[in-house]
Image (cartoon, grey):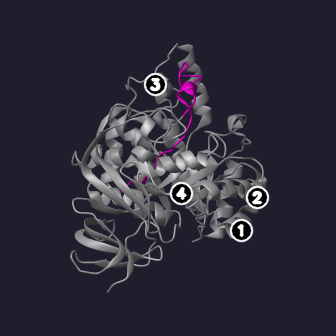
C-alpha cells in the first residue's frame, strides 16, 4: 500500500472503541484510509512521526456559546481557541425568540469564512414558532438538537432575548421532538420558583460568596426539575440530553431513571470537576449551575468513571474579565473553557488514576459524535473524517490565557500547572494547530449538517 496523503506513524493509538495499541494511521482525501501496524513501510506525501505521542480522534466540544464575545470575529478567536485545545469540531448555541432562518443564514456565512474547526449549531427554543418550524430546521439546516431552559419562565430569560414559557410548552416541545424521531432536546434543568425564594433569602442574608451563590440555586433545584424532564420525556418518547449536570442529587435521579428509560444522556463540565463552593476566586467563578460541594465534585468523577455521564463539554462563554469583576449578584455568568478541557481531564483524571485514556476519548470524541449525529466524527476507523489530536501525556504547562487565543482574557486555570497537552490537531488531514500555535487558515472549517 502506498500513496497516502498523510501518514501518522509510530504513535500510541487511543481508540474509544477498540482500546490502546501501537500503530500508524493513513489519511487520504480528508478521510482515514487505513489503520496499519507500526513500521508497515507504506509511503505518503507527508509523514508525521508520532513516537512518544498518543493519537486520539479529533476532539469535540458540544457546548460553546456564540454571541457573548465580539460579534462575527468570535468565529475566528473562539475556533482558534478550540484548535489550541486539540478540538477539531464544536457545536455552538444560538438564543432567540424569533425564527432561526435569517439568523442561521447570517451566522453560517460568518462562520464559514472564519472558522478554523468544523462547526455546527444548536437552536434554543422559546416560542410557538420554534415548535412549528422544528421540522424545517431539521430538513433545511441539519440542526437536530434544540435547547430548552426550564428556568426561563416569566421574564427570567429576557436578558438573553428569550420569551418565557411553561410546562405546557415543554410538553408540546417534547411531543414534537418525539414525532420527528431524530431530534434531541437539550434540557437546562432548574426550578426557577424554588430559585427565586432561595435567592431572596440569600441576598437578604448579605451573602456575597460563591457558596452564597450556590445557596440561591441549591442541588434540589437541579434534581427536582431533572425528575420532571425525565418523566415527561419517558411519557412522550422523546430523547433528552441534560447539560452541565453538577450535583450528586441530580445524577442519582438519572441513574435511577435509566433503569426504565434509556433515551437520556448527560454532560458535565470541567469546572465542576476542579472547583467547589469554597474556591477562592470570587465572582470570576460565577456560573450557572454554581460550583457545588466537595461531595458533588466526587460524585461527578464517579459518574465519569462508571459511565453515568456521557460527555464532558466546556459551556464556553468568551466574556471579558471586566464583566466578572463585580459583586457576585451582578457579575456575568460563565467563562472560557474549551482549550483546557483535555489538560484538565489528563492532569486531574488520568494522571490521578481516576480515568483511563479510553474513557477520556469516549467522553470527548465518540459519545458526543454519537449523541449529536456528527457523522464521520469521533472515530479513527477507516472511512471516518481524518480528524486527529496528538497528545503528549507528559508535557507540563502553566496555563496562560494570553496563549489560548480566546476573545476572553482570563481562565479559571490561570497559573495552574497541568500535565498532558495536545501538541497537534489535524482536521480532515490538514494540520490546524502545532505546538500551541494555530497553523491552519480561517475558513477551512466546514459546517456540520447533523441528521439521524
Q: Which of marks 1 and 4 precedes in the sequence?
A: 1
Which one is nearer the viewer's eye here, 282 or 296?
A: 282
User: What's the distance in space between the residues labelled 2 and 4, CA to CA?
Assistant: 28 Å
Q: Which element carries disc 2, helix, strand or loop? A: helix
Q: Name the residue under label 4.
A: 441
Residue at screen point 39% across, 47% down: 341
Please count the marks in the image.
4
The reply to whether discs 1 and 2 touch (Cβ–Cβ < 8 Å) is yes
First to last magenta residue range: 307-333
Alpha carbon separation for disc pair 4 and 1 = 28 Å
Question: Does dot 4 land on a helix, a strand or a loop?
Answer: loop
In the displayed structure, does residue 306 sit left or right of residue 271?
Answer: left
Tell me which numbered mark, 4 or 3, is placed earlier along the sequence. 3
Name the quadrant of the N terminus.
bottom left
Rendering quarter of residue 434:
bottom left
Pick whichever of labels 1 and 2 is earlier in the sequence.
2
Viewer-nearest residue: 429 or 363: 429
Dot 3 or dot 1, earlier in sequence: 1
Pinpoint residue 10: horizontal percent, then vertical percent. 23, 68
Q: Contact (CB < 8 A) between labels 3 and 1?
A: no
Q: Element type at marker 3?
A: helix
Q: Residue beneath label 3, please?
A: 210
Cα separation, mark 3 vs mark 1, equals 43 Å
Residue 331 in magenta stretch: yes
Q: Do the residues labelled 4 and 3 touch (CB within 8 Å)?
A: no
Q: Which of marks 3 and 1 is in front?
A: 1
Q: Which mark is residue 101?
A: 2
Label 1 and label 2: CA atoms lie apart by 9 Å
The nearer-to-camera label among 2 and 4 is 4
Which badge, 2 or 4, is on the more N-terminal residue? 2
Q: Looking at the image, which residue is at 62% across and 33% down?
A: 193
Residue at position x 73%, y 58% in the image: 105
Amino acid at each position: 500500500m502506498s500513496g497516502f496523503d498523510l501518514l501518522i506513524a509510530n504513535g500510541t493509538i487511543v481508540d474509544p472503541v477498540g482500546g490502546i495499541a501501537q500503530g500508524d494511521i493513513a489519511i487520504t482525501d480528508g478521510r482515514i484510509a487505513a489503520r496499519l501496524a507500526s513500521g508497515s513501510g507504506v509511503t505518503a506525501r507527508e509523514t508525521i512521526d508520532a513516537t512518544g505521542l498518543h493519537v486520539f480522534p479529533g476532539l469535540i466540544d458540544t457546548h460553546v456559546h456564540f454571541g457573548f464575545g465580539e460579534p462575527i470575529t468570535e468565529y475566528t478567536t473562539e475556533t482558534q481557541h478550540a484548535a489550541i485545545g486539540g478540538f477539531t469540531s464544536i457545536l455552538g448555541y444560538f438564543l432567540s425568540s424569533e425564527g432561526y432562518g435569517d439568523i442561521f443564514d447570517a451566522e453560517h456565512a460568518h462562520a464559514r469564512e472564519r472558522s478554523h474547526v468544523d462547526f455546527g449549531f444548536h437552536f434554543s427554543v422559546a416560542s410557538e414558532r420554534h415548535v412549528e418550524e422544528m421540522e424545517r430546521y431539521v430538513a433545511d439546516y441539519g440542526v437536530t438538537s434544540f435547547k430548552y431552559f426550564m428556568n426561563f419562565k416569566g421574564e427570567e430569560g429576557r436578558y438573553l432575548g428569550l420569551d418565557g414559557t411553561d410546562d405546557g410548552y415543554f410538553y408540546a416541545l417534547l411531543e414534537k421532538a418525539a414525532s420527528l424521531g431524530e431530534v434531541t432536546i437539550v434540557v437546562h434543568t432548574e426550578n426557577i420558583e424554588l430559585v427565586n425564594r432561595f435567592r431572596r433569602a440569600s441576598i437578604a442574608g448579605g451573602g456575597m460568596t460563591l457558596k452564597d451563590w450556590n445557596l440561591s440555586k441549591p442541588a434540589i433545584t437541579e434534581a427536582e426539575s431533572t425528575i420532571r424532564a425525565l418523566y415527561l420525556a419517558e411519557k412522550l418518547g422523546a430523547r433528552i440530553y441534560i447539560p452541565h449536570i453538577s450535583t450528586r442529587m441530580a445524577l442519582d435521579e438519572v441513574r435511577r431513571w435509566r433503569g426504565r428509560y434509556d433515551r437520556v444522556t448527560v454532560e458535565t463540565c470541567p469546572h465542576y470537576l476542579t472547583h467547589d463552593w469554597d474556591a477562592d476566586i470570587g465572582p470570576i467563578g460565577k456560573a450557572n449551575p454554581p460550583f457545588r460541594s466537595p461531595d458533588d465534585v466526587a460524585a461527578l468523577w464517579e459518574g465519569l468513571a462508571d459511565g453515568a455521564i456521557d460527555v464532558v463539554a466546556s459551556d464556553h462563554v468568551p466574556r471579558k474579565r471586566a464583566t466578572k469583576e463585580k459583586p457576585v449578584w451582578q457579575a456575568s455568568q460563565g467563562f472560557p473553557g474549551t482549550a483546557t478541557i483535555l489538560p484538565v481531564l489528563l492532569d486531574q483524571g488520568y494522571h490521578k488514576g481516576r480515568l483511563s485514556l479510553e474513557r477520556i476519548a469516549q467522553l470527548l470524541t465518540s459519545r458526543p459524535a454519537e449523541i449529536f449525529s456528527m457523522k464521520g466524527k469521533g472515530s479513527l476507523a477507516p472511512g471516518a473524517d481524518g480528524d486527529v489530536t496528538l497528545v503528549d501525556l507528559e508535557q507540563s504547562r502553566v496555563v496562560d490565557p494570553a496563549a489560548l487565543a480566546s476573545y476572553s482574557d482570563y481562565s479559571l486555570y490561570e497559573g495552574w500547572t497541568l500535565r498532558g497537552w495536545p501538541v497537534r490537531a489535524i482536521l480532515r488531514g490538514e494540520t490546524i494547530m502545532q505546538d500551541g500555535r494555530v497553523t491552519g487558515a480561517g475558513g477551512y472549517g466546514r459546517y456540520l449538517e447533523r441528521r439521524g
